Image (cartoon, grey):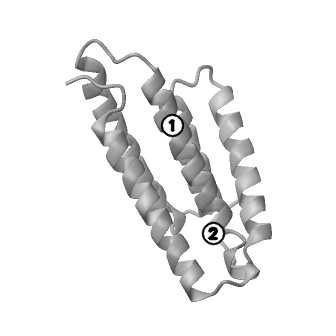
Amino acid sequence: MTSRFPATHAILLGLILAVSGFITWSAVSASTRLGNLVVVVPAAVMLLLLAILVVASALRRPAPESGEDEEASLWSDLLLLAGFAVFCYALTHIGFDVATFLFVWAGVVMSGGKGWWRPPCFAALFTVLLVKAFGSLFPYPMLTLVL
């Protein structure tokens, strides 16, 4: 079966939106103060907008001709999901910064990043920005190894 929007992507997107909706509902029902909602509501709105953009761009593309692309997409999705599980495990064992760097580096390489210096440079820049942004946003100390 060929389609423009694979079922695995639809299921993953639905799960992400369901969890985001539940977290937003839980935060709003707990307290409507600005301090409680300053991160949750903008993140939920951004996720909803990104989901709409992903679905719209997928529906504008032509459907693939053969089932090989769908099977490759399934294995790629499963590999990325396994990588995310390893990333979640590594957060508490090697630190947020190193785990993020390795996960982003692997994701860029899996997505077709070329060259020997571009993927690690992008991963390092993304990691530094993410760690510094989270560190300034949340007072909770994160386990980090380098930063």
The kind of residue tagged 2 is Val
Closer to us: 142 or 130 = 130
Q: Quadrant of residue 68?
A: top left
The local crowd at label 2, few if under 14, some if 14 to 19, many if 20 or more residues have their Cα within 10 Å, is some
**Residue beneath label 1, please?**
54
Q: Residue at x 51, y 67 (%)?
A: 93
Asked whether residue 144 is in view, the answer is no
SS for tag 2?
helix
State the image coordinates of residue 147 (x, y, percent, origin top left).
75, 60
The kind of residue tagged 1 is Val
State the image coordinates of residue 42 (x, y, percent, origin top left).
67, 62
Q: Quadrant of the N terminus?
A: top left
Q: Quadrant of residue 10?
A: top left
Which circle marks residue 40 in the picture? 2
Closer to us: 71 or 91 = 71
Which circle marks residue 127 in the picture? none
State the image coordinates of residue 102 (x, y, percent, origin top left).
56, 46
The local crowd at label 1, few if under 14, some if 14 to 19, many if 20 or more residues have their Cα within 10 Å, is some
- Answer whether labels 1 and 2 touch (C-beta < 8 Å): no
Q: Residue at x 72, y 74 (%)?
A: 138
Asked whether residue 90 is in view, the answer is yes
Direction bottom: furthest residue: 30
Q: Residue at x 65, y 41 (%)?
A: 123
